Image (cartoon, rainbow, N blue to C red):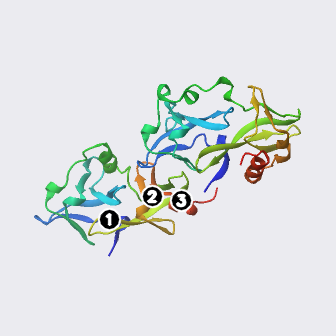
Amino acid sequence: MTLLVNASQITGLPVVTVYGGDDVAEVRDVVYSPGAGRLVGLTLNKRGFLAGRRREVLPAEAIHAIGRDAVMVSDESSLVLPEDAPDDVAHPDADRNVVGDDVLTEGGVSLGTVRDLALLVGGTGEVVGYQIDKPGGGQGYIPLPAQLAVSGSALVVPDITEEFVRDDLVGLGAAVDEFRARLGLR
Amino acid sequence: MSDSFRQCAGRKVVSRTSAQALGTVTHLLVDAPGRQVAAVIVGKGKKARLVDWSALSGFGPDAVMVGDDSALRPPADDRELDGANGKLELVGKRVLTERGNELGSLADVSFDPATGALETLRVGDREIPADTLLGSGSYAVIVDDSQEAQAQPA
């Protein structure tokens, strides 16, 4: 079963070992590479009330699965210290955060500002779209891969993205394949 | 005839040599990869003792028989200590698929009292074959992908 969720719904999920059945951490934040359009890893908190940050990070490659109720890893060795982790997880670019960025089409139309990421869960968490605050108010979703350039304050998407703005995650799910087909991506 | 984790809780543990009751079954510790009962936990808290499945002389419907009181041993490692403290008790634990979706809480586990082999996991009103079991620990019992279609929709 795969489903779409907002990245913010993943924060706070327990990180559970498949073969140990233990909750070894919980998700603090999603580390996302806007350039590559993919999730690169997760930062972690300790489990428990007011337990604080864990130094280790979880690279995307070490994630067994992201589900509705937990992030699954094989065992605790999947959690690695920043010095042993890929650079993009350990030291994410300062401008990696696209939340708040203006979404502009190549034609110069603003579709809104980025509110959250839409992730396909059930696998390892492919980023398939953005949730946006529309300029006229209200929220919508646009599919990825769409962006052509990211600056830290704006991202530029193809003109056809405007036709694929959807009201909810269900609509986005249906739009992603058609959108990618139109762009010749599959 | 199969037995279950709930049914055997509270059953007497009796020494075959002295005919004395040595305690009662608190719960069972499992070897998840082996899909097998690993040990019987007798008593609770600091007084809890383990009997390895291989040290039992019989797991009967009315009593669990051991050779003598030397079959009872203290926890030997962290995992067994967690077991003795009740942190690894399966019944009541949440069941997750390996994809991270919850199926519900574990109501009971049936097993073959002759061999200790786990048979089925009962979650709500569903019976899940024990060969789907991947891991069990302090937080959850993990089953494989084959149960994914049963996960509750969001």
Residue A64 percent location from the top left of the image = 51, 46
Which of label 3 and label 1 is nearer to you? 1
Which of label 2 and label 3 is nearer to you? 3
Residue at screen point 67% across, 28% down: A96
Say left or right for A78 vs B112.
right
What's the amino acid at mark 1?
A: Ala
In which quadrant of the rendered view does residue A139 lie? top right
Tag 3 secondary structure: strand
Which of label 2 and label 1 is nearer to you? 1
Label 1 crowd (10 A; few <14 / some 14-19 / many >=20): some
Say left or right for A78 vs B54.
right
Check disc 1 and report the residue beneath it: B117
Residue A174 percent location from the top left of the image = 75, 54
Residue A138 percent location from the top left of the image = 83, 43
The vertical placement of A12 against B37, above or below, is above
Image quadrant where one finds the N terminus of chain B? bottom left
Check disc 2 and report the residue beneath it: B92
Work out whether disc 2 and disc 3 sit on a shared chain: yes
Precedes in sequence: disc 2 or disc 1: 2
What's the amino acid at mark 2?
A: Gly
In which quadrant of the rendered view does residue A162 lie? top right
Precedes in sequence: disc 2 or disc 3: 2
- The residues bearing labels 2 and 1 have C-alpha atoms spaced at a distance of 20 Å
Chain designation of label 2: B
- The residues bearing labels 3 and 1 have C-alpha atoms spaced at a distance of 23 Å
Chain designation of label 1: B
